[in-house]
Image (cartoon, rainbow, N blue to C red):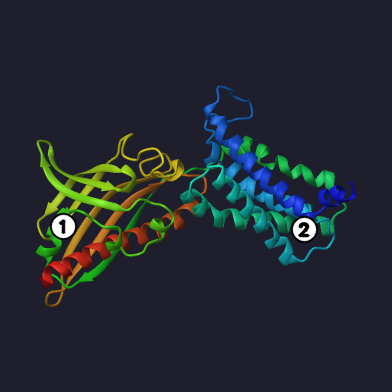
Amino acid sequence: MKRMAALKNSPLSWIFVGASYGILMRVLFGLWPDTTMHWAILPDSFKGLMSAAFLLGTPTVIGALTILGLKDKNPSILRMMFSPWITVALMLFGCAITLLEGSICLVIMAPLFLLLASIGGLVMGLTIRFTNRTRSELSSVALLPMLMLMADSNLPVQPRVLELRRSVEVKAPPQVIWKEILEARNIHPEELPLSFPHLIGVPKPVEGINFQTPEGEVRQSRWEKGVNFVGIVTSRDDNHSIGWRYAFNAHSFPKGSMDDHVAIGGKYYDILDTTFNLTPADGQVTRLEIVAHYKVNSCINFYAIPISRWMGNSFIDSILGLYKSRSEHRHSI
């Protein structure tokens, strides 16, 4: 009995409490939009897992509960900030092994959750240190995500259209690179330079081919995991520039090919168009540039935009590396 009581009062137990709380919130916020129930507190525009109540409120509470469980009236600042990281890591691990989330979402959201958990832990630690609030009073912080629901519909959600622009110098003439762009067949995984999106599970391109249809030129793209989509060519200047806008459909990204909340063409993230530009430089060197436009639409654009820009640039650099390698190899033959 004494051993069980000691375990119950152990700070370690509160790490499991915080992690369990996070997993419970993941389940609840994931289920609510799919139920027939409509609670009075839920706004009409309730976004479930993509709501500020879940994305911002839950990790903040996880951090606060971790520090509350330390039962230390004077925890150090470092302890306030970094102890919650253990709880967040345990929660994310729990979401992974129960298949509540895929690897892409988990990796993308981990930095935000760690930051907010540190803020929650710091606020809770300072509250314990400088106030006389009882622990039962402070434990009411667990209601924060529910309270945030009432304000969730009033938070500004501004869709942002953004541009990515990357380039590389290729030791080959434009006509050689042009042919590789229009007929990128049998792309092997090892041909693509290392990129962060591919490391966390974003499917790799397998094929990209342009062909004519009665309605005009089309770009057909195939990726791993059955991903398949088209681009409608909107501009073309042979050996100089070609661009297309994407036309995704319900079958473009099969179930399991990408996490739902970051799926391209979804409610929160969409790639709009891509343009390849070829500019001759000195000698046989050509500057190959890719310009892409995409849309981000979430309540955490302050975080989603820099993350999407970083990942998008990494993905494009990988594509540029592929065309550079293939073009230079073809030109050397």
Q: Where the C terminus falls, by quadrant?
A: bottom left
The image quarter containing residue 26 is: top right
Assess disc 2: are there few (<14), some (14-19) or many (≥20) residues with their C-alpha within 10 Å of its C-alpha. many
Residue at 46% x, 56% y is 307
- Say which amino acid is labelled 2: Gly
Secondary element under disc 2, as helix, strand or loop, is helix
Residue sitting at the far top: 36
Left or right: where 172 falls relative to 120: left
Residue at 77% x, 42% y is 140
Secondary element under disc 1, as helix, strand or loop, is strand
Report the front residue among 185 and 118. Answer: 185
The percent coordinates of residue 153 (x first, y second) are 56, 36
Q: On residue 182, which mark appears? A: none
The percent coordinates of residue 41 (x first, y second) are 64, 29
Residue at 31% x, 59% y is 316
Residue sitting at the far right: 2
Relative height, residue 269 to residue 165 (above, below) = above
The percent coordinates of residue 108 (x first, y second) are 49, 53
Mark closest to the chain's N terminus, 1 or 2: 2
- Say which amino acid is labelled 1: Ser
The image quarter containing residue 199 is: bottom left
Relative height, residue 228 to residue 85 (above, below) = above
Q: Which residue is mark 1?
A: 241
Assess disc 1: are there few (<14), some (14-19) or many (≥20) residues with their C-alpha within 10 Å of its C-alpha. some
The answer to whether the residue labelled 1 contacts the one labelled 2, judged by CB atoms less than 8 Å apart, is no
Left or right: where 210 falls relative to 155: left
In space, the residues marked 1 and 2 are separated at their CA atoms by: 58 Å
Q: Which residue is mark 2?
A: 125
The percent coordinates of residue 235 (x first, y second) are 16, 50
Report the front residue among 216 and 152. Answer: 216
Residue at 25% x, 63% y is 322
Relative height, residue 204 to residue 211 (above, below) = below
